[in-house]
Image (tube, rainbow, N blue to C red):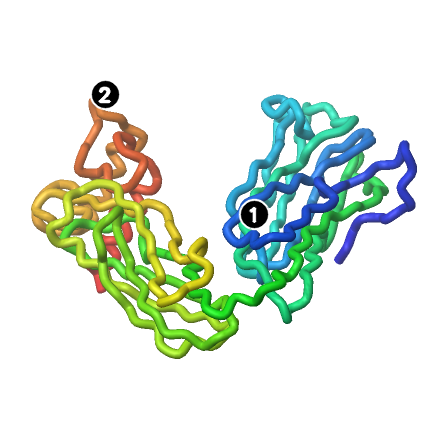
Amino acid sequence: MIGNVHVAYAQDSVLLKVEPELIEYHANATGQQFNVSVKIYNVSNLYGFDLQFKWNATYFEHVSHTVKVPKNTNPDGVLYNPILPLKDEVNNAAGTYWIAYSSMAPAEAFSGNGTVFTMTFNVKYHPAEPAADVYAAFDFISTDLADSGANPIPHAVETGTVVLYALEVPIARDAAVTNVVPAKAVVFQNASISINATVGNLGTETISFDVKAYYNDTEIGTVTVSSLASGGSREIAFSWNTTGVPAGNYTLSATAFLTDDQNATNDHYVDGIVWIKILAEGVPSDVNGDGLVNFEDVVAACLAYQATPEDPHWNAAADLAPPEDYIDIFDIVTVIWYWSESLE
């Protein structure tokens, strides 16, 4: 349900606006990044907002975003402390972002101009003729602005547009790697982890090609993709056995190898970090070192909760997940996860 009230925009009326209004790409923009911001102008007595934002997920993907709340710590932002975060959810597959924040007493209401959030996007691929030009709106599904009396604030909305002008010369052969996702962010030494990659054919010919996965610069394995039709995509899987791999942080990536590829800019995709950890006796989550994973390990980890190496209750064996040298909820969840696995 769209809760906002749209009115004809006048100089002194409240405006919710996407900036910049227009971004144009005449050349191949695949892999390029750009920023858009959502700003509020001429608002008075703003105490909370609920916005649902959307983009074309076929051509663009969310990379990161920055919420400019509160103004106390973001001079160009909106709302004042104390703040209640209600929603901050990106759905990259659907191309949506839902954000909702409210001030709480005794915060003062916000008036004036400010930025709600800024988002960085990546161009997934650029159309080529005979495909049409793409006029992609960066628009709202719904917008609600509330004053300090819980009343709706009438406002106008202005959206943004990104134009991808179809390339004049069609790309016949173009293999791309568009995603690399590890099954886990943390894996224990001598264990195996599944790595999924998504590949696409952005050219006009049906193609077959090899894809190699890597940790840092070391190859994990090769998968052959056969007869991928134009415009098609496919998920492939690699299995990484970490036996013999030293404990540490490793960057995952995948590369497509296609003979006569006409667009090399999208052949290589780099993902995030996978942590390889080694524990006492090589047993995951064996915090107390007795060779078993049981409730005693959960208790031992909880006793070290929020500890650092300088604290008397520090337990290095309980430091199972990033960040290093701090026992937090992620370490506790790791112990509980392996304990629950041992019960099956």
Task: Please report the residue visible at 80 percent of the width from the left and 48 percent of the height from the top.
Answer: 4
User: Which mark identifies residue 121?
Assistant: 1
Q: Position of residue 19 (x, y in %)?
A: 71, 40
Q: Amino acid at mark 1?
A: Phe
Q: Is residue 30 left or right of residue 164?
A: left
Front position among marks 2 and 1? 1
* Front-lying residue, 278 or 231: 231
* Rendered view: 316 above or below 179: above
Q: Which residue is mark 2?
A: 310
Q: Nearer the viewer, residue 188 or 201?
A: 201
Is residue 311 toward the left or the right of residue 131 in the image?
Answer: left
Horizontal and vertical percent position of residue 274: 29, 47
Quadrant position of residue 134: bottom right
Which residue corresponds to the image point at 66% horizontal and 39% vertical from the top-left? 37
Q: Considering the image in quadrants, where does the N terminus appear?
A: bottom right
State which tag comes first along the sequence, 2 or 1. Answer: 1
Q: Residue at x 86, y 48 (%)?
A: 6
Taking the image as shown, residue 275 lies to the left or right of residue 281, namely right
